[in-house]
Amino acid sequence: MTDHDRGSTLNADAASAVEELRLADAQLRRRRQASSGPREIDRRAFRLIAEAHDDGRPLTAKELARSLEISTASTTILLDRLTEAGLVMRRPHPTDRRAITIHPTGRPLDLGDELSRRIAEVANELDPEEAAVVARFLRRVTGVLDSESR
């Protein structure tokens, strides 16, 4: 077997592993929708809010609704849920008196989430170089999935 053949096999293994991850994620999502845990939309919203905060840009409820492709009424219900859970807070927009901005409180979404803890344990088994390669790969796969969902 040539080095090229071995590389192709490893690449196919990586692609296959991503497919397995997608299937496992879909199964988990179906189970979670049936339970009372955080909803998928809550997780997506929280991620967008945290990213905007980390980038130092205000995120309005209207922008969040547009990003999530949901109505402003649904966004209000979602923000009420995240606020009640102590995950986000609303503040007046710094320049637009009609708008509010949404900010994370610093409390993690998965507080006490066993799955997140177990994933962190697996990630901690990687050395820093491996972690960087895996993170870069997964972010590129995420970009592919995000572009496909638009």
Image (cartoon, rainbow, N blue to C red):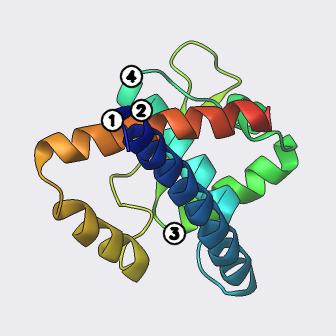
Q: Residue at x 51, y 59 (%)?
A: 17
Per the image, the residue denoted by label 4 is 56
Residue farthest to the top, as pictured:
95
Q: Earlier in the sequence, mark 1 or mark 2?
A: 1
Per the image, the residue denoted by label 1 is 3
Q: Earlier in the sequence, mark 3 or mark 4?
A: 4
Quadrant housing residue 124: bottom left
Per the image, the residue denoted by label 2 is 53
Question: Could you tell me which secondary element the residue under label 4 belongs to?
Answer: loop
Left or right of 44? Residue 53 is left
Of circles 3 and 1, which is in front?
1
Q: Residue at x 13, y 45 (%)?
A: 128
Q: Amino acid at mark 1?
A: Asp
Residue 109: which disc? Answer: none
* Image quarter (top left, top right, bottom left or bottom right) of the C terminus: top right
Q: Residue at x 76, y 58 (%)?
A: 77
Label 1 neighbour load within 10 Å: few <14, some 14-19, many 20+: few
Alpha carbons under labels 3 and 1: distance apart? 53 Å
Asked if the residue at tag 2 contacts the one at tag 4, i.e. Cβ–Cβ closer than 8 Å, the answer is yes
Residue farthest to the front, as pictured:
1
Q: Amino acid at mark 4?
A: Gly
Asked if the residue at tag 1 contacts the one at tag 3, i.e. Cβ–Cβ closer than 8 Å, the answer is no
Q: Nearer the viewer, residue 138 or 79?
A: 138
Label 2 neighbour load within 10 Å: few <14, some 14-19, many 20+: some
Question: Could you tell me which secondary element the residue under label 2 belongs to?
Answer: helix
Alpha carbons under labels 4 and 2: distance apart? 5 Å
Question: Could you tell me which secondary element the residue under label 1 belongs to?
Answer: helix
Per the image, the residue denoted by label 3 is 85
Q: Amino acid at mark 2?
A: His
* Image quarter (top left, top right, bottom left or bottom right) of the N terminus: top left
**Residue 10 percent across, percent down from the top left:** 41, 48
